[in-house]
């Protein structure tokens, strides 16, 4: 393999990585919040809500044995 073909391979890998990263970012930005809200309605998050945890900005915040507990579901 020549140095030119190695350089082209690296450019190809970088281009594919940027493309896949952009797709993932767009999916997470536009479809992610709705998916995360569905997730909080399932076990085990419902158990925490039952014992008094409150949902704030993609976190469940509550107290267990006098300790403040923060659970991220993002």
Image (cartoon, helix red, strand yellow):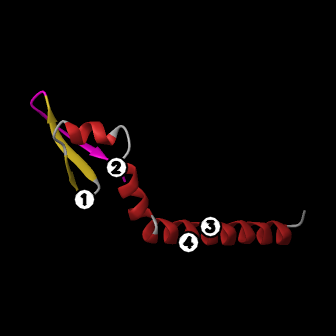
Q: Foreground mark, 1 or 3? A: 1
Please report whichever mark, 4 or 1, sits nearer to the chain's N-terminal start. Answer: 4
Quadrant of the rendered structure where residue 57 is?
bottom left
In the image, taking residue 37 as reference, residue 31 lies left or right, namely right
Please report whichever mark, 1 or 2, sits nearer to the chain's N-terminal start. Answer: 2
- What is the distance, in whole Å, between disc 4 and disc 1 at their CAs? 24 Å
Dot label at residue 22: 4
Compared with 25, 69 (above or below) is above
Residue nearest the observer in this picture, 31 or 26 = 31
- What is the distance, in whole Å, between disc 1 and disc 2 at their CAs? 12 Å
Determine crowd level at label 4: few under 14, some 14-19, many 20+ residues with C-alpha closer than 10 A.
few
Determine crowd level at label 2: few under 14, some 14-19, many 20+ residues with C-alpha closer than 10 A.
some
What secondary structure is marked by label 2? helix
In the image, taking residue 49 as reference, residue 26 lies left or right, namely right
Residue nearest the observer in this picture, 15 or 58 = 58
Determine crowd level at label 3: few under 14, some 14-19, many 20+ residues with C-alpha closer than 10 A.
few
What secondary structure is marked by label 4? helix
Q: Foreground mark, 4 or 1? A: 1
x then y, percent, for residue 63: 14, 36
x then y, percent, for residue 38: 39, 55
In the image, taking residue 57 as reference, residue 73 lies left or right, namely right
Extreme residue toward the top, this view:
65
In the image, taking residue 64 as reference, residue 57 lies left or right, namely right
Which residue corresponds to mark 1? 57
What secondary structure is marked by label 1? loop
Extreme residue toward the right, this view:
1
Query: Which quadrant of the rendered structure holds the N terminus?
Result: bottom right
- Give the magenta part as a residue range: 65-74
Which residue corresponds to mark 2? 40
Based on the picture, tell me whether residue 3 belongs to the magenta stretch.
no
Q: Main secondary structure of the magenta part?
A: strand
* Residue under the image location 57 percent in, 70 percent down: 23
């Amino acid at each position: 393999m020549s140095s030119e073909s190695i350089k082209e391979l690296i450019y190809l890998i970088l281009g594919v990585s940027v493309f896949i990263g952009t797709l993932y970012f767009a999916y997470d930005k536009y479809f992610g919040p709705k998916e995360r809200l569905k997730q909080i309605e399932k076990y085990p998050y419902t158990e925490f809500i039952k014992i008094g945890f409150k949902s704030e900005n993609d976190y469940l915040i509550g107290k267990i044995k006098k300790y403040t507990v923060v659970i991220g579901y993002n």
